[in-house]
Amino acid sequence: MHLRPLLRPEKIRPSHLHWQLCRPQALLHRYRIFPITHIHTTASSKRPPANPRSLPLQTNIRRTMSVSSTQKSINIAVVGVGLVGSEFISQLLAFPSPSPFRLVALCSSKTTLFSKTGLTFSASGWKSDLAQSTEGVNLSDLQITLAALVQPGQKVVLVDNTSSDSVAALYPSFLQAGVDVITPNKKAYSGDLKLYEDILKASLDTGARFLNESTVGAGLPVISTLKDLVATGDKVKKIEGVFSGTMSYIFNNFSTGEAGGPSFSSVVSVAREKGYTEPHPADDLNGADVARKLTILSRTIPSMRQMLSEGFVSVQTTSLVPAALENIKTGDEFIQRLPEFDADFADMRERAAEEGNVLRFVGVVDVKNGLIKAELAKYPKTHPFATSLGGSDNIVMFHTERYGTRPLIVQGAGAGAAVTAMGVMSDLLKLI
């Protein structure tokens, strides 16, 4: 079996554009990172007055929360109450008191709850109240309503926990109205370049922020790490990693560097049973999810921002879906027929093992050579992609000018409602 490019790569031409959203001073202010102005190396009863910028991190956090608690609440509208949305709401409602957050709207695919003074729920809980609501969903009306709540010193935030293209298309209008946008939804940041440029322009016009940490690596600090590297002037040379929890699980179990092992179809079947794959495994095996994440990362690097005019479909992507199974309609039928191709996958595994390698499905953003690709690749058994991964972990390596000899590595659980919602919550905390 020959692996095929899923999509035809677009010719890449770097352009050197200044990314205004990642100016170092703005980043440091937004993340409340301050230089240490006093360092005491000896004991003394005559210490200078406490400077909040020189206090330990925990002290600064307490002071920050104390100051924030005296400010106006941040109004939050949540769209999408599925697995991630429900977990996010749970984390939001469990935030320690006094909370700076006020939940003013909840929207499912069918109904809406709204109160400009903050929602309160019956004893049966928010899910029951939302299900029983008679108010339908109109996101254009919601945008107008939220815009009316925007006041000086009063933030309003849209949290989109859906995977909807139609919701993503509305981000520019929300931002233009002064409403901050936080989301794990990859669609807006990995699709057509025009939508992404519209989001950037609206954010720059109004100062409203868009934050999308959870679009890559769930709760792992992948996006924020890359933004920090760019904002502080480091030169990113290459990013490579295992970006798919599904692909990670499959190849961690299928290819260990030793001869033999379980069949490819059996590993995919178990992954599906455990909920690691989409209902139709082809939606993971075609590599599109990894291509979307690479698009998001590449657009965070100024010189690569305009390379993928059509978004993820322009990424050079290798599909692991056999040609004969590309048009299979159901996941059940796909799993039934996948064993027909076990010998092909086993042969690739054997050849890799003979060379002392393992197989891993990786994504690469090669800044130096202007290349963005998602592919099945071989790595030595001693490589971190072979030795450090377990279960459905993600791992991302940043090769930069500063991290030249030893790359900066971010690793951990890259999928799951709890960690994804945590990433959304961490973005929300950046607005305090």
Image (spheres, rainbow, N blue to C red):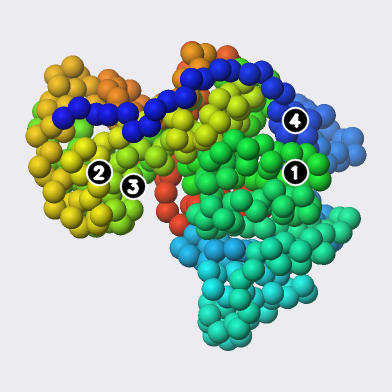
Q: Amino acid at mark 3?
A: Asp
Residue lying at 23% horizontally and 22% vertically, measured from the top left:
357
Q: Is residue 339 left or right of residue 214?
A: left
Residue density around tag 1, few if under 14, some if 14–19, many if 20 or more, within 10 Å: many
Which residue carries the number 3 mark? 283
In this rendering, the label closer to the viewer, 1 or 2? 2
Which residue carries the number 1 mark? 202
As helix, strand or loop, the secondary structure at mark 3 comes to: helix
Q: Quadrant of residue 35?
A: top right
**Which quarter shows the N terminus?**
top left
Q: Is residue 222 left or right of residue 199?
A: left
Which residue carries the number 4 mark? 20
Mark 3–mark 1 Cα distance, whole angstroms, equals: 32 Å
Relative to 193, say whether 207 is above or below.
below
Residue 261: x and y in percent read 12, 37
In this rendering, the label closer to the viewer, 3 or 4? 3
Q: Amino acid at mark 4?
A: Gln
Residue density around tag 2, few if under 14, some if 14–19, many if 20 or more, within 10 Å: few
Which residue carries the number 2 mark? 326
Relative to 361, say whether 16 is above or below.
above
As helix, strand or loop, the secondary structure at mark 4 comes to: helix
In this rendering, the label closer to the viewer, 1 or 4? 1
Mark 1–mark 2 Cα distance, whole angstroms, equals: 39 Å
Does residue 101 show up? no
Q: Nearer the viewer, residue 194 or 347?
A: 194
Q: Are the residues flagged by discs 1 and 2 in contact, CB closer than 8 Å?
A: no
N-term-proximal mark, 3 vs 1: 1
